[in-house]
Image: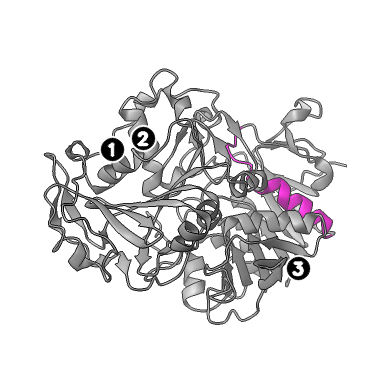
Amino acid sequence: MSKITDFETAVADIPSGATLAIVGVIGWIVPEKLLRTLGQRYLDTGAPGDLTLYVPCFGGDNGAIKGIDNLMHDGMAKRLITGSFINPPDPETGERPRSMGQVRADKIEAYTFHIGVMMHWLREIARRSPGYLTEVGIGTFVDPDLDGGKVTPCTTEDIVEKIDFRGKPHLFFPSQHLDYGIIRATSADQHGNLCFEDDPLVSSNLAIALAVKACGGKVIAQVKRTYEPGERHAHMVKVPGVLVDHVVVDPDQQLVTGIQNDARFLGQTRMDPRELQPLGPGAPTVIARRSASLINENELTIYGFGASSSIPTIFATEGRFDGDGIYDYPSTTEHGSYGGIVTSGWQFSANYNPDALLDGVTQFDAIHAGLCKTCALAFAQFDAEGNINVSKFGSANPGSGGFIDIAHNATNLIFNGTFTTGGLKVDATGGKLTILREGKVSKFVSYVEQVTYPLLTGVRQRGQTAHIVTERAVFAVKQYGLEMLEIAPGIDPKTQVLDLMDFAPVRVPDNIPLMDPKLFI
């Protein structure tokens, strides 16, 4: 019997109170039409309501692909467990994500944990273990001694425990029961065998299918097209049909917002790195250039979302990738794309010209193994206690994504971002930096709003090295605390740096070395 059916039939049996595990990475591999159909069923009938949504990485970009927001109608979801949130407004309407509206209005129980937990948790569910045990996350907002991952006031149940194991503190995440899996691939045959020939990410698709079937649940897969049995090499099938109950077909399925297909994300069509547009003058360019100087050749570097993802563009446009130079700077992201050129903005997660792709669970195995020696990540706040925050600041609550996993397990840590935010405007030309308008918000604070990573603890206890790179100053985090290393030409260290910090660095040289004037061109 064929497993291919229509969208309405595929979601018709999902009952109220069910727990759904759903794939997606921003706009990538989101089963958009399937989620939209389920959301419309709720609007039409009032069911299914009170759903629990288990989302390893938030799917949806609040543009053309709404993802999880399709299920964020009042009363439809009672609980959301995710590795990240999406905050930006719809570029067409200006509306904020519906999920953020539910969170800010305290209408939904919400938890956010690091993506490594979300991925590895699925493996433990799949093998029917008691749960997932890890040291990663101790001392962060995931730790029950702090927030326990809880996001909203109505979120009261503790779903992570802190326990002693062999004399050391660990976080323990008891296994969850999953009723349905909603996943996505490129193609399927009538038996449900799934291939990803157009998709540059696999993410948690297989992990969700295995975990849901271990719980006795059902898996629904959305694809772009079908193929006849025997048309695909067995190596192309990433999710076997025995793990899939229903298949729905959306021929208009987008690769990501605004892109139907692009073979450059699979390495089939090679893009010349020199085709990339150079970054224009400004603070982000200065930060990316200075951070690039801290990247070691022939050492796997993992890049995070935000300013860090612009560093490979600097390498490409300055000629370091010419010839086979790109292989001197091996790179990856938390979502499993290896080699090539890391993309930025809402296309982040997939690389141009990748050499290999790993699924989400395996990629976090590599991250936790410390194979990504260097990491380049953004920062929103740094405090006097040596803590970094990217997960909650002001009205934004994006969560940590893979930040905690990456920062905990790397050796050489680079954090970059502007010195202030909220209206900052600079002139970064002529070999110097001029502040035209100062940002309203300082990033160097007495106490971070949320501890995403206790950086000073990592430096002291695990021997990590760490730099914080801004457009006007470069710092190192040493065992004794924060040390200023460099100042931008044209910047007064007292009035334009130290006076804007809520705390003083432990060490400031008498004659602060200048950042290279070539950064400011």
Which of the marked residues, 2 or 3, is nearer the chain's N terminus? 3
**What amino acid is labelled 2 in the image?**
Thr
Q: Position of residue 72 (x, y in %)?
A: 56, 67
**What amino acid is labelled 3 in the image?**
Pro
Q: Is residue 86 visible?
A: no
Is residue 209 magenta-colored? Answer: yes
The region drawn magenta spans: 198-215
Secondary structure beneath dot 1 equals loop
* Disc assigned to residue 440: none
Q: Are marks 2 and 1 in contact (CB under 8 Å)?
A: yes
- Write down the quadrant of residue 343 in the picture: top left
Q: State left or right for residue 143 relative to residue 278.
A: right
Residue depicted at x 53% and y 81%: 153
* Disc assigned to residue 279: 1
Residue, far top: 323
Q: Position of residue 261 (x, y in %)?
A: 53, 33
* Disc assigned to residue 313: 2
**What amino acid is labelled 1 in the image?**
Leu
Secondary structure beneath dot 3 equals loop
Of residues 312 and 292, which is closer to you in this image?
292
Q: Position of residue 15 (x, y in %)?
A: 76, 68
- Residue 225's place in the image compared with 100, above or below, is above
Which of the marked residues, 3 or 1, is nearer the chain's N terminus? 3
- Residue 135's place in the image compared with 347, above or below, is below
Which of the marked residues, 2 or 1, is nearer the chain's N terminus? 1
Residue depicted at x 57% and y 82%: 154
Q: Which residue is mark 3?
A: 15
Q: Position of residue 520 (x, y in %)?
A: 18, 40
**Alpha carbons under labels 2 and 3: distance apart:** 47 Å
**Alpha carbons under labels 3 and 1: distance apart:** 50 Å
Q: Nearer the viewer, mark 2 or mark 3?
A: 2
